[in-house]
Image: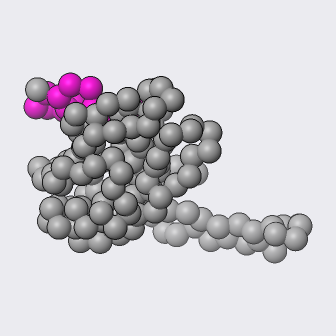
Amino acid sequence: VTFDPTLGDVPALQLDGTLLEGNDASVQVISCDENVHQILHFLPLSSSSVEGHFYLAYKDERTRFMNVDSSVDDLQDAILSDISSILSISIAEVDDVSNPGAKSFDLKLDLFEGPADLFFAENYMISSGRVDVVATCPTASPQSPTHSTRSVVGRRGPVFV
């Protein structure tokens, strides 16, 4: 179910799962606030692993340069230290068995100032791959490509370089 954003806050949906059948049958409502849930991908272009450095930009701020081998703690420290408008973030590494050599991190903005924005991953001296960020809720699609960013040269937006 999707509500038009012009409606503003809508009352919470009420659920009744009493007629569900099965051992693990359940029903739940999951909130999907734009750009709160994102995924950071490190995608190899060949059988080689991705190497190099990148930084994450968020609104008008950015992190320090980070190595593609950064850990969850490294990412969390860089984001919370370098981007003042993000006050709390949850990060978890995700295994991608369908793409050998790929690495991904789930990013969930827990506490932030203003509306949530999409991170922009700037590839810096990246070899054998690319780094990008995609909003996972709502998901990007050909009809709504604004839910993903990919660094090629410069950055998409009103100030394209």
Q: Quadrant of the C terminus?
A: top left
Identify whether 124 is placed above or below 8: above
Q: How many marks?
A: 0
Where is residue 72, by image quadrant? Answer: bottom left
The x and y percentages for residue 104 are 46, 49
User: What residue is at 51 percent from the left and 29 percent from the top?
Assistant: 47
The x and y percentages for residue 50 are 39, 37
Residue closest to the eye, 70 or 114: 70
The x and y percentages for residue 2 are 52, 49
Identify whether 18 is placed above or below 105: below
User: What residue is at 44 percent from the left and 37 percent from the top?
Assistant: 49
Where is residue 51, by image quadrant? Answer: top left
Q: Is residue 4 magenta?
A: no
Residue closest to the eye, 49 or 103: 49
Q: Is residue 40 visible?
A: yes
Q: Is residue 149 magenta?
A: yes
Q: Which residues are magenta?
A: 145-160
User: What residue is at 34 percent from the left and 67 percent from the top?
Assistant: 73
Residue closest to the eye, 149 or 105: 105
The secondary structure making up most of the magenta span is: loop
Q: Is residue 134 visible?
A: no
User: What residue is at 62 percent from the left and 39 percent from the top?
Assistant: 98
Residue furthest right in the image: 22
As drawn, is 86 to the left or to the right of 103?
Answer: left
As drawn, is 90 to the left or to the right of 81?
Answer: right
Where is residue 125, by image quadrant? Answer: top left
Residue closest to the eye, 85 or 71: 71
Identify whether 146 is placed above or below 16: above
